[in-house]
Amino acid sequence: MTSSTHVEPHIKESSYIRDLVFGFGDGVNTSLGIVAGVGGAFAAADVIILAALVGMFTGAKAMAVQNYLAVKSQREILESEIKREEFEIENLPDKEKQEIEDIYRAKGFQGEELAKVVDKITSNKDVWLKTMLTEELGLNLDIVGSPLRSALVMFGSFLLGGILPIIPYFIVKAGLISSPIAIGIAIGVSVFSSFIIGAIKARMASKNWIRGGIEMAGLGTGIALVGYGIGSELTSIGIVNIKSS
């Protein structure tokens, strides 16, 4: 008789995977909005590239700084809670042990079984501390990353996504395609990339990946249409007058 082990597939989220996915998606949509908007004003390829690159690097820097501050604040809160729990475990062990008991009683443990669980957890201060942080405070210790590394991942992924809608205009500069074709390619590449990012986001959230991909792709398409419409309208009413070369 053979025994088989059932293993359920799970995605173990980390802060870096989250930063990579969100940074890439934001980068694609930011650059696409600029490319479509400036392209809608019938600007020359040089102008579109310049505007998109400036927007891309500015957006990447802003997102990286925000991510750094957010992760830093999260770590500071976590470190503060760790110190508080360490103090209470060291100085108020009976109170903290009672809290462990209450937590596992609420999970259905009773009598001797409950006593064994509590004794096992409180016999190791590291396990005791982690249990208090995760069970009592709901802090996920596994997804808190380094502020600097999170910022760098966000910065790099934003640039990686942001460059995709710009690449077709370098091909325009080489004289291989026209600007209208470049806009179409930029939208196509961005929508496809947005679908992939949306699918990954949905998968990480245990939701329907097809729906998530379509929603994200639709957002990218909407940004392109709005950007192109704004650029075209501003040109037609004479607020901007950029001649394409």
Image (cartoon, helix red, strand yellow):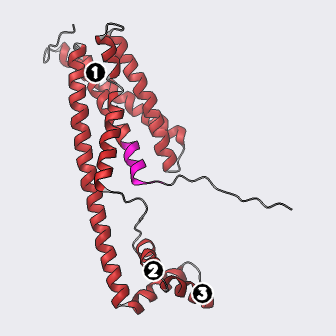
Camera-nearest label, 2 or 3: 2
Crowd around label 2: few <14 · some 14–19 · many ≥20 (10 Å) = many
Residue 16 in percent (x, y) is at 39, 50
Residue 145 in percent (x, y) is at 36, 57
Which image quadrant: the C terminus? top left
Camera-nearest label, 1 or 3: 3
Mark-to-mark CA distance, 1 and 2? 59 Å
Sequence-wise, which precedes: disc 1 or disc 2? 2
The residue pinned by badge 1 equals 229
Q: Please tell me which residue is depicted at 28% across the width and 52% down the height of the picture.
A: 148
Q: Is residue 21 magenta?
A: yes
The residue pinned by badge 3 equals 110
Check if mark 2's residue and mark 3's residue have beta carbons within 8 Å.
no
Mark-to-mark CA distance, 2 and 3? 19 Å
Residue 184 in percent (x, y) is at 38, 17
User: From the viewer's perspective, is residue 196 above or below residue 95?
Assistant: above
Q: Residue furthest bottom?
A: 94
- Residue type at mark 2? Trp
Sequence-wise, which precedes: disc 1 or disc 3? 3
Q: Please tell me which residue is depicted at 27% across the width and 66% down the height of the picture.
A: 76
Specify the label residue 70 is tagged with. Answer: none
- Disc 1 secondary structure class: helix
User: From the viewer's perspective, is residue 124 above or below residue 7?
Assistant: below
- Residue type at mark 1? Gly
The residue pinned by badge 2 equals 128
